[in-house]
Amino acid sequence: MNAAIILLLLAPSAMFAQWLDYPTAGVPRAADGKPNLKAPAPRTSDGKPDFTGTWEPEKNKPCPPEGCDDIQTPWEFANIGWSVEGGLPFQPWALELKKARQARYSLDDPATQCLPVGIMKTHTAPLMKKVVQTPGLLLILSERNAMYRQIFTDGRPLSVDPQPSWNGYSTGKWEGETLVVQSNGFREDGWLDRGGTPATDALKMTERFRRVNFGRMEIDVTVDDPKAYTKPWTVHLVQTLALDTDLLDYICAENEKDRAHMNSK
């Protein structure tokens, strides 16, 4: 077999193996050929907004009051309540717990231990997620630890007494153009951000997903946790569509050498 034939046989496998650079199909284009991310959002066969795509947290957001340290990391990842007017309505014990977690430099954060991080930090962590929308089910696949989340849209109710889990249990229904997702069944030792903002097993979370155009998804997340907070509170999160790329596994414990050198002193 001559060299030309060998190259011809190898070329397809080499070309299609590069999924991180593979063009995203169905992207609307402007007159100059560039992606038109402000084009209308795509729709499913039943006319609902289609959230399918690879998403990441919005970058280059306005600075929080304490200033900008890293424009690539969403402020909510470190402090989920930075934009809540008047600050988060902590129960006294919850505020003390957050201070204690910070005093230990978040050494006890599940993320530090390569454990799952829950819904809120999955939304705000600077890693990509892939949404797969099907009739009756919306899946969120995460780069971090190759995790998944299921949101059932088949009409089933939330469980009354669910087995506690990292991501809880989620059901969604449509209110016009908005997918409203209710979740419960969380663990009692939750972290909502890197700064140690707590959540308990009493947490009920409501997310309102809107795909406002082709390239932008907005999520209003309401935290209702009477054990940890005196009243419900809401944060506004933005995700942007990532084109011509795909998920790349980030397995936290693989070759992890940092934790042994961490301490709170």
Image: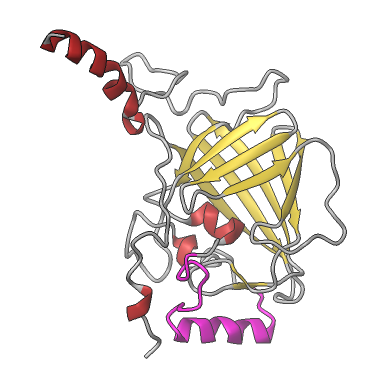
Residue pictured at 46% horizontal, 77% vertical: 106
Residue pictured at 66% horizontal, 86% vertical: 93
Q: Hey, which quadrant is residue 252 in on the image?
A: bottom left
Residue 237 image position (x, y, % from top left) = 55, 51
Q: Please state if 202 lies on the left or on the right of 220 as rendered.
A: right
Q: Please state if 203 lies on the left or on the right of 80 as rendered.
A: right
Q: How is the image coloured?
A: secondary structure
Quadrant location, the C terminus: bottom left
**Camera-nearest residue between 143 and 124:** 143
Residue 54 image position (x, y, % from top left) = 48, 36
Q: From the viewer's perspective, is residue 20 above or below residue 251?
A: above
Q: From the viewer's perspective, is residue 25 above or below residue 54?
A: above
Magenta span covers which residues? Answer: 89-114
**Camera-nearest residue between 24 and 249:** 249
Residue 219 image position (x, y, % from top left) = 60, 47
**Camera-nearest residue between 186 and 60:** 186
